[in-house]
Amino acid sequence: MTHESAPQADGPHELLAVVRDLTHQVRVAQRGTWFPLLVFAVITLVAIPVYRYAPYLDLFDTCRSRPQHTVCMAPNPTQLGYWTVALVLAYAAIAGFYVRQSRRRGVGTPIRPYVVVGVALAVLMAAVSIWLTFHPLIPVPADPFSTDPVEIEVGPAAWLVNGLASPIAVIALALLVLARVERNWALLAYSLVYLAIVMVQGGQVIHSTSPWFFLPYLLVPAALLLLGSAAFALIRPTTEVPGR
Amino acid sequence: MINHPTNGLDDVVHQRVRLGILAIAHQARQVEFGFLRTTLQLTSGNLGQHLTVLEKAELIQIEKGYEGKRPRTWVTLTAAGRAALRDEIAHLKQLIHQVEQAETAPTADQ
């Protein structure tokens, strides 16, 4: 049997074709795309009870009170704490997964840039979120107790900075780095579509008095991540290195 | 003297299997003996011989160890190996370019 990557003639065309084919085989063996997507889907779903039930910690003194009425002008810092810790733990788990996969398949993976960028983006997200608490880009109503609906005009710069403060968007930005690391066009396309959907969705204001009003913000990205994980799992290589 | 691209070809690298080993090790950073054997479809003895040639030329480093009870041999490309692979690919591309130019150039008897 003659393998595609091992033509018998050693002409320059054939040798270059061998290099290209082998490089592609290694890249495919290095991929483990389904796992990061699954981890991010899980932490997005776990965020639901945190958003709903975590008590508001007024760390940044943004709450104003009247008798039987308190209004807080910034998201719950508990949510920010959750996302920062969850993202860092997720990247630790992803790094561990790729190292184990490397040993099992017998090929190293240059996963470090993805993990470093992911953790850096998580820290940047936390810093930008805290900065936005004190320097809001969206105009704050003079009377925090007013119940009149406010029309909000958001410029591109505010949209971008708010995106950096969004854990869901930060996950997508890091996935672009993973697509580069894995030389994975399918993941690049998936990440761009995912990023576009979550950025558009993040710009939508949900007017609701329900304590579950935030659900679409978390369920949509979680569903996209789960679907992506399942799709990439179906096409993943299962080769394990045989013993010597 | 005419500097033909074939003059720059290194006999150690200009060989299908050894070029393949270097290409895999370059992409993988570190690659296991079993992966090389399966991917290149070689016997252990044949692969071992090619690895010895590359190791003697200081183009790869070989580390032996155990993972649990299973012996493992890991191959890493050296800086010289990376340079040799880069040069070989450049020479191959140059060769193809020259052949294509020769084929398209008008001949004297036309």
Image (tube, coloured by chain):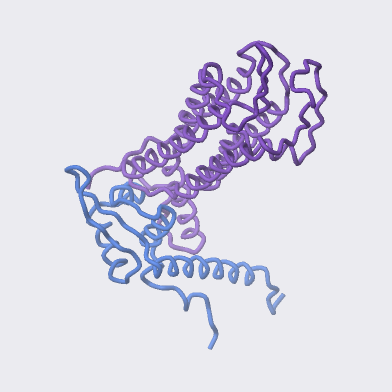
Compared to residue A214, the image places residue A113 above or below, namely below
* Quadrant where the image shows the C terminus of chain B: bottom right
Which chain can be seen in purple?
A: A
Q: Residue at x 54, y 40 (%)?
A: A122
The color chain B is rendered in: blue
* In the image: residue B83, left or right of residue A62: left
Q: Residue furthest left?
A: B69
Compared to residue A220, the image places residue B64 above or below, namely below
Q: x%, y% of residue A226?
A: 52, 24
| Rendering quarter of residue B19 | bottom left
Compared to residue A138, the image places residue A208 above or below, namely above
Q: x%, y% of residue A112?
A: 45, 49
Of A48 and A100, the residue lying toward us:
A48
Of A117 and B12, the residue lying toward us:
A117
Of A17 and B76, the residue lying toward us:
B76
Compared to residue A3, the image places residue A80 above or below, namely above
